Image (cartoon, rainbow, N blue to C red):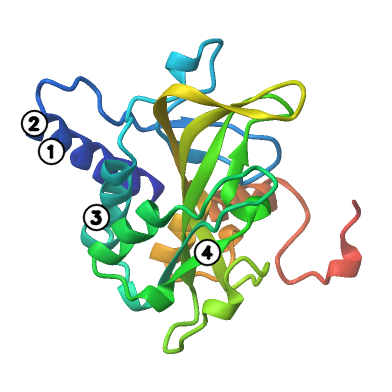
Amino acid sequence: MAEAIFNEAENAQVVEDKRKPAQKDPLTIIVIGRTGVGKSALVNSLLGDTIDRLALVTDGKEAIEMAWSFLTDTLNLSKDRLYVTYFGGDEKLNLPPDDECRGIWINLGLSPERVLPFSVNDNFWEMGDTGPCGPCTEIHYDRIGGRFAPNLVNMDDPDVLELWNIVIMQFNREADGSIKRLPRNYIDTGLGLERIVSVVQNKFSNYDTDLFLPIFDAIQQASAYTSTQSESDCYY
């Protein structure tokens, strides 16, 4: 399944390249490893030594449209299970709500009730104490379905999980804590690989997908442990 998702992403990329032949590699999809198990992601860029490596797409509207199209058209996820968030502004940073981002989502057909504002803690991404930063918009998926659950978004509910994050890099965080406008916008966007596989396979745990089950089967075959043993039999 993971390989199939990569293939779909690559196919979507080919279509995008043909649509805009003058724009080389508008969204290069790669995999990066992150700290801990189950943290790889489909992303468009690696954080490098220079600001120019931060992103290959500079248009937030295009990044949002590509993400939405991939989830709803390519993977056929139900739009009734999806919610999106955007930056709701911050007085301390003297930043207004990202109404432009909100408008893009509504123009794509989402009802305003599914486009939710959040604070700097949830929807303003920073790479560290200093460096590039900016408002972000996220796509969340309700595993349960058949309900209207905006109150569960960004509440650490295991059944309403973030799938995709799109960061519009507009600022640089200075050593004194202030932010300064970058000369141009950059987009850093990623899709959680294990999460999207679990959604497509209709599993409630990343570890019940074909990304991990073959590994667990191999461990059982190479050891005395079987899935019928109780948890108390395991030693950590």
x, y percentage for residue 21? 9, 24
Mark 2 sits on what residue? 18
Residue occupying image coordinates x 40% and y 32%: 44
In this view, 108 is above or below 28: below
- The residue that disc 3 covers is 69
Q: CA distance from mark 2 to mark 4?
A: 35 Å
Residue depicted at 32% across the width and 60% down the height: 103
Identify residue for label 1. 15
- The amino acid on which the numbered mark 3 sits, given as a three-letter code, is Ser
Q: Are marks 2 and 1 in contact (CB under 8 Å)?
A: yes
Residue depicted at x 30% and y 66%: 106
Distance from Cα at disc 4 to Cα at disc 3: 22 Å
Circle nearer the N terminus (1, 3): 1
Q: Earlier in the sequence, mark 2 or mark 3?
A: 2
Q: Quadrant of residue 30?
A: top left
Check disc 2: other Cα within 10 Å, few if <14, some if 14-19, many if 20+.
few
Q: Position of residue 127 (x, y in %)?
A: 64, 31
* Residue 104 position in % (x across, y down): 30, 56
Viewer-side label of 2, 4: 4
Q: Given the image, on which type of amino acid does mark 1 rest? A: Val
Q: Residues within 10 Å of mark 1 (few under 14, many from 20)?
A: few
Q: Badges 4 and 3: C-beta atoms under 8 Å apart?
A: no
The span from disc 2 to disc 3 (Cα, nearest Å) is 16 Å
Considering only order in the chain, which callout, 4 or 2, is on the residue closer to the N terminus?
A: 2
Mark in the foreground, 4 or 3: 4
Q: Identify the disc placed on residue 117.
A: 4
